[in-house]
Structures are given as C-alpha cells and as structure tokens.
Image (cartoon, rainbow, N blue to C red):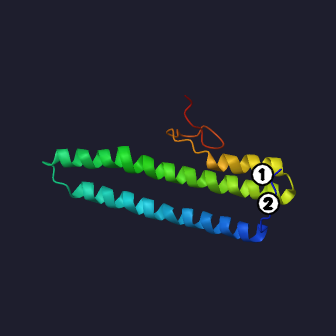
Amino acid sequence: MAVWNIDVTAASSTIKATAAQVEGAQPCLEGMGTALQQAAAAIPDDAGVVLAALNDVVTLRLGPAATEVASRSENVIVSTAQALNFYQQGDLTMATAAQRSAGQVDSRTPVAPTSGPMKRLKD
C-alpha cells in the first residue's frame, strides 16, 4: 500500500495558485482573439487568400489548442484537488484513483457540454 506524507495546507495553496494562473490566461486568450480579428479587418479585400489563411490558423489551430489547454488544465486542477481532499479524509483508494485520472488526458476534440461537466466525443 502506498504511503504518502502530503502537507495538505501547502498543497491546497499550490492548487489555488495554479487555478489562479489558469484563470489569468483567459484574458490573454481573449486578447489574442481580438488582435486576430483586428488583423483580419485590416487585410485588404483583394487579399482573400491571406484572410482565408488567417481564418484557418485561428479556426484549425489556435482555437482548438486554446480550448485543449484550458480543458486539460481544469482537469488536472480539479482531479488534484479531489485527490488531496480524499487523502485528507483518509480514503487512499479514492485518492489514488483521482490522482491517476489527473494524469489521463483525453486528446480527442471536446464538444459542447449538454449539461454538467464537459462531454467528450467517444470512439
């Protein structure tokens, strides 16, 4: 059986600080979106190929990547907090399961949630 010696107070502080860092990235992502919209608006009408390329970069690369980073970060933070909570309550089996789930990242494209936590595409 695993034996852990976790400083719950320090770990909680680290989780909160990490969550704040992730939340702080949201305005940067929104700012990037605004800057790209402004860049697209500045492209002359006769440069449709450039506008299409910029749209592809945003739609196919930056948007999905930003969504994935946010989703993975949220998964790790929530699972780590849950594992810490289980550890604090003395349920090491649940803590181990939660810790393991924090390391499992689903790389498939997320879809809009219908309710509750984000739903993912199934194989």
Q: Secondary structure at mark 2?
A: loop
Upstream in sequence: badge 1 or badge 2 = 2
Taking the view exactly as shown, the residue that stands out farthest to the right is 90
Q: Nearer the viewer, mark 1 or mark 2?
A: 2
**Picture quarter with the C terminus:** top right
Q: Which residue is mark 1?
A: 95
Q: Position of residue 92 (x, y in %)?
A: 82, 51
Q: Amino acid type of disc 2?
A: Trp
Q: Position of residue 61 (x, y in %)?
A: 37, 47
Taking the view exactly as shown, the residue that stands out farthest to the left is 46
3D distance between C-alphas at marks 1 and 2? 10 Å
Tell me what residue is drawn at x 59 percent, y 67 percent.
20
Q: Residues within 10 Å of mark 2 (few under 14, many from 20)?
A: few
> Is 6 placed left or right of 122 in the picture?
right
Taking the view exactly as shown, the residue that stands out farthest to the top is 123
Frontmost residue, 120 versus 87:
87
Q: Position of residue 54 (x, y in %)?
A: 27, 50
Q: Are marks 1 and 2 in contact (CB under 8 Å)?
A: yes
Tell me what residue is drawn at x 72 percent, y 67 percent.
11
Q: Secondary structure at mark 1?
A: helix
Tell me what residue is drawn at x 71 percent, y 51 percent.
99
Tell me what residue is drawn at x 19 percent, y 55 percent.
43
Q: Position of residue 49 (x, y in %)?
A: 18, 44
Q: Which residue is mark 2?
A: 4
Q: Amino acid type of disc 1?
A: Ala
Q: Residues within 10 Å of mark 1 (few under 14, many from 20)?
A: many
Quarter location, residue 80: bottom right
